[in-house]
Image (cartoon, helix red, strand yellow):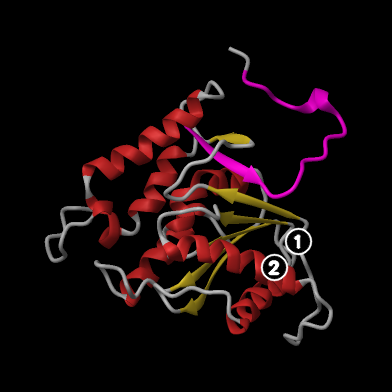
Amino acid sequence: MPDVDIMAMGAHPDDIEIGCGGTLIKLREMGYSVVLVDMVRGEMATRGTIETRRAESAEAMRIIGAGARENLELEDGNIHTSQEAKYRVAQVVREYRPKLVLLPYYEDRHPDHYHASQLAYDGIFMAGLVNFDTGQENYRPGRIIYYMGWYEFEPDFIVDISSQYERKMEAIYAYSTQFKPDDNFYQQTRLTSREYNWGLEYRAGYYGSLIGAQYGEGFKIRGRMAVDDPMQLTFATF
């Protein structure tokens, strides 16, 4: 599926769903094409295996409605901006040629998350260089937007995901080994705690409330937004 509208990149399978799953579902409902790219397979996770994570990520992709999901198969727990890693990012960007790329925020408690953000940006930049050889035509998307991970930021804009929230949570819970506490085969983690699940809802509720909606997802723009007609902008005035 060349020339897709949106590519969302994340460090681990489930990062995309948590950070911007509702927005991706909304974009698919609007008719835009979406492809998901995970950087690692999740082999360092406390719960689950590479095989279960692969099946879970496929189910989450189905729920979101994405047309494809790729995994760069980098080393979990050791994402870094090596030449080989940038090559893999450039390859997938050149293959799908997205108009917009969603990336994890570049500040986070998890090293894989902020390293994934830097790697993605570096790889996207390299994808635009004619002499960076991957055997493909060079291409660089013009729009990069950051979604929230563990750390929050003051968003440049907020997307109303009230109608998509339940499906977002369905996509997250597709990773049953990671988020559902009733599987006693694995030890309990922060992700399976009620506090973490409350946090997901409270965050979405908070950012939704800022725009007069039930649920929202906040984003930060890379660069500056050009506006031709300010009358077309939507503001929360309440």
Residue located 25% across and 41% down the image: 195
Please, what is the three-letter code of the amino acid marked with disc 1? Pro
Q: Quadrant of the N terminus?
A: bottom right
Q: CA distance from mark 1 to mark 2?
A: 8 Å
Q: Which residue in the structure is indicated by mark 1? A: 141
Q: How far across and how far down the image is residue 143, in percent?
A: 73, 53
Residue located 37% across and 33% down the image: 202
Please, what is the three-letter code of the amino acid marked with disc 2? Ile
For residue 11, which numbered disc appears in the image? none
Q: Nearer the viewer, mark 1 or mark 2?
A: 2
Q: Is residue 217 magenta?
A: yes
Asked if residue 7 is positioned above or below residue 207 in the image, the reply reads below
Asked if residue 170 is positioned above or below residue 199 in the image, the reply reads below
Q: How far across and how far down the image is residue 16, in percent?
A: 49, 56
**Contact (Cβ within 8 Å) of mark 1 with mark 2:** yes
Q: Which residues are magenta?
A: 215-236
Q: Judging from the image, what secondary structure is the residue with disc 2 in?
A: helix
Q: Can you tell which quarter of the image residue 4 is in?
A: bottom right
For residue 124, which numbered disc appears in the image? 2
Asked whether, in this view, residue 170 is left or right of residue 3, the answer is: left
